């Protein structure tokens, strides 16, 4: 959605905002300006989604797949298995 439309759409923002409202303990279907995200550019929205997934799914074995999906594997996977342990 973000890549095709060159930025966030009202539908994608509403989906993100429903999750944010629920996380903050509010009714997900009631808009709240103090919690809701505003329209973002394509890059801003992608960075927000990537950061949110990193926080939410860090301990659920999704991080490596996300890094590969977004071609960011150099961020967190710079050492090969053969180099462990890092001390010798």
Image (cartoon, helix red, strand yellow):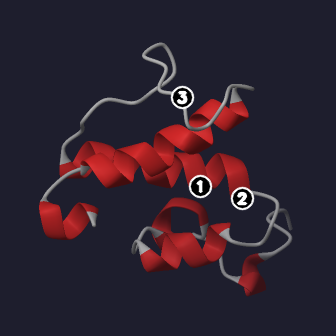
Which numbered mark, 2 or 3, is in the foreground of this view?
A: 3
Q: Residue at x 49, y 38 (%)?
A: 17
Across and down, in percent, residue 10 comes to 27, 46
Q: Nearer the viewer, residue 58 or 25?
A: 25
Instruction: Identify whether 34 is placed above or below 61.
Output: above
Residue 43 in the figure: left or right of residue 17: left
Give the distance between the C-alpha atoms of the residues marked 2 and 3, in whole angstroms.
25 Å
Viewer can see residue 46: no
Local secondary structure at mark 1: helix
Q: Which mark is residue 53?
A: 1
Q: Residue at x 52, y 70 (%)?
A: 67
Q: Furthest residue to the bottom?
A: 82
What is the quadrant of residue 48 in the picture? top left
Across and down, in percent, residue 23 comes to 70, 34
Instruction: Identify whether 42 is placed above or below 80.
Output: above
Q: Are marks 2 and 3 in contact (CB under 8 Å)?
A: no
Instruction: Identify whether 59 is placed above or below 52.
Output: below
Residue 32 in the figure: left or right of residue 12: right
The residue carrying mark 2 is 57
Residue 51 in the figure: left or right of residue 47: right
Which numbered mark, 1 or 3, is in the foreground of this view?
A: 3
């Amino acid at each position: 959605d973000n890549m095709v439309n060159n930025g966030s759409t009202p539908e994608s923002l509403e989906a993100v905002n429903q999750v944010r409202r629920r996380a903050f303990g509010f009714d997900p279907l009631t808009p709240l300006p103090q919690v809701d995200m505003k329209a973002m550019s394509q890059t801003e929205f992608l960075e927000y989604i990537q950061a949110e997934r990193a926080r939410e799914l860090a301990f659920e074995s999704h991080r490596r797949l996300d890094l590969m999906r977004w071609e960011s594997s150099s961020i967190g996977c710079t050492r090969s298995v053969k180099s462990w342990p890092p001390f010798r």
